[in-house]
Image: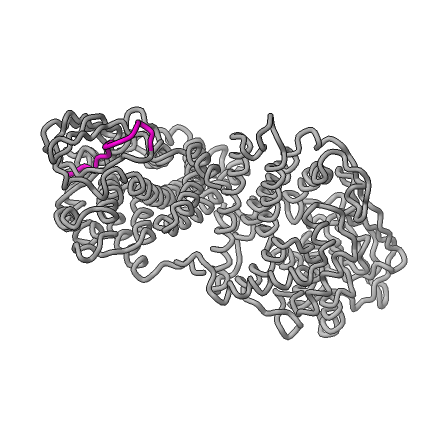
Amino acid sequence: MDLKYSDEERAFADEVRAFARAELDPAVRDRVLNHKRLGKEDFLGWHRKLHSRGWVAPNWPTTYGGCGWNAVNRYIHEEVLAEEGAPPLVAFGVNMIGPVLIAFGSDAQKQYYLPRILSGEDWWCQGFSEPGSGSDLASLRTKAVLDGDHWVVTGQKTWTTLAQHANLIFCLVRTDASVKKQEGITMLLIDMNTPGVTVRPIITIDGEHEVNEVFFDDVRVPKENIVGEPGKGWTYAKFLLSHERSGIARVGQAKRELRRLKEIAAAEMVDGVPLIETKTFREKIAAVEIDLMALELTNLRMIAAEKSGQAPGAEANMLKIKGSEVQQNLTELLMEAVGPYALPFNPDALEPGWNGEPIGPEYAAPLAGTYFNYRKVSIYGGSNEIQRNILSKSLLGL
Amino acid sequence: MDFSLSETQRMLAETTDRLVRERYGFEDRKKILAGPDGFSRPMWATFAELGLTGLGIAEEHDGLGGTMGDMAVVAETFGRALVVEPYLPTLVLGAGPLGLAGSDAQKSEILPRVVSGELFLALAHGEPKSRYTLCHVDTKAAADGGDFLLTGAKAVVLGGDAADYFLVSARTDGTTSAPHGISLFLVPRSVPGLAIRAYPNIDGTRAADLVLDRVRVPASAVIGQAGHGLPTIAHTIDRAIAYLCAEAVGAMQALNALTLDYLKTRTQFGQPIGAFQVLQHRMVDMEMALEQARSMAILAADRADDPHPHERARAVSAAKVQIGRSGRMIGQCSVQMHGGIGITDEYAGGHYFKRLTLIDRTFGDADHHLARFAAAA
């Protein structure tokens, strides 16, 4: 038993940290740390820096331009970058469709798409959820019919994150209505610029535009844009979601937010005493910090098991649940910390370069919005209730 | 980074696991509790034969050496079996501080006899009014010639019913809550002026209240430096908490297994109750609570001997908070999911619930350690 990183692992963490400090645009870092709005270029600029270092795809094998790292180094890389205030890697290409193509894609698809994911040339989005298919994803109704050399796609996707930036979407579509619902699903790769694709913003309760509806109106998709075989889309989607969940605990990000919470709670005064020194609030911070310590160790235990050859299983679902709870607790305490200055709604203050007069302390503007926004983390990627259903079957045999 | 057990730990796990499987089933335990001492001296002799009473004691005193991580392996198995023998009092709370601060004479006199299974020890530190505050010591040690006279009361001394020696804290200096001026004395059970009221705890472990009325001990009975006992006591209590955390993990694991089994076998409305989603989700939450607790128990054992008291205190308190919360949640949910059978004396589940509940009350509950952690942040 040794809870400390090895010398090599520590050296690697230092290397990642030094890279982030040298290469991350301070303005972008500031936007991440202060919960300001991130533009497409903020994500892409950082993506390209990682690419030039060869660090975009820690989870891909080296043959495809990935890092081929073990689970521990992947974890260190992700957590250190998050702690340093790097923008999150846009996951849809690297963590989601990339691994699916590597496992199930045709040679032509791998040769064409994978390098473009690495370079940031393509921005993918995910077409899974539909208005009538949330937790019951397999009930999806967007339909694709083969017509000569094309699939003709009709239907609607929703909750499509950052579709406004994307030029490509991977979609689950129904290609056979006569079989069991999971077996009639196919995965297609669709160019967002194809005629008949329409993106409509969904504004969330924080006033922000992050998710979208995507409509398909007789969209003609080349026949070869199918992933693997028809009717296997559900299998590929499950594979993809298991990749999405690794790193889902977001420990690095949570550490960053905890640090921020302590800074703000030290600046806020209650009857002449810093908020962080009041018993009630100090103990609230302590409670979430302990949760985070336990989460980090649980995450490390699972990673160590993965490194020693055990496949990730139920652990990912647990990390998703606990990780989302910690993130939500932190965003709630951040909002609570600024007291009445959680009230004003000033979305302009989130815009890079805004020079107006802040309402209250400068750090207050995004906090309520972030709290409202972060209710999403226990809903997306399979709601926490769905995670519990999965664990109840897979872990407990119920 | 490596979370696997060492070779020694694997052996300890196998040895203790076999022992409790073969000789410490729930029915065996009932017989042990009904015996004259409330625990089993033959079982203790077996612990000694297996070397368990030498764990954490230096080789020069016939012990096996070993880390808190090694003891945690034993603690976890003992937690699974709800072992009631005074292992924590004797090894961690008794032999522990002697090893940390005792004189060569004290160590040579006591420790080999602990290893051989001959002696039981107990730490008599808590007092009727001290609650969980370690520096609260009212018991006085007055110098008298070359001796000390100890006068005061000690409360809920774990293992105090069986102890052959007590490690008694008393003030040689300072006011009730001063951190300085606390000394630790080695006091034999049979000394004049020491009244012992022994009793069972509600979970089957045993304790005693002590009244000391001018108990005379020689200066050579001081453990470590007079007036500087608190750091040793605090370190010992942190090690004991690490032990309790591991024991609690064993108890939680066993209780979760019982509960899951019950969900699969108990039928109502024509189906196993585990088919109901409301119970499935609760059971998943119990498993998560166990994993989080296990992570923190590992941390506590790892840091229990950290040379930096601040780091040690932070980690141990964080772990105790987690163990307290997980144990409460698992204990209460388990009873609820069992229904009436969960609160019967004949069923094992309720006994795990009681042990977990008492662990939270021992050496500081979740609230106490949350405050301690927050203050150390």
Corner quadrant of residue B50: bottom left
Q: How is the image coloured?
A: one colour
Extent of the magenta region: B165-178
| Left or right: B285, with A35 as reference point | left
- Corner quadrant of residue B158: top left
| In front of the other: B114 or A135 | B114
Look at 59% across and 37% down and name the residue there. A266
Q: Compared to A99, does B74 lie above or below?
A: above
B350 to B241, vertically: above or below:
above
Name the foreground residue: B368 vs B250.
Answer: B368
Q: Nearer the viewer, residue B364 or A261?
A: A261
Residue B261 visible (yes or no) = no
The structure residue drawn at horizontal position 71% and vertical position 55%, both measured from the top left corner, is: A26
Residue A152 location (% of width, % of height) = 84, 59
Question: Which quadrant holds the N terminus of chain B?
Answer: bottom left
Number of numbered labels in the structure image? 0
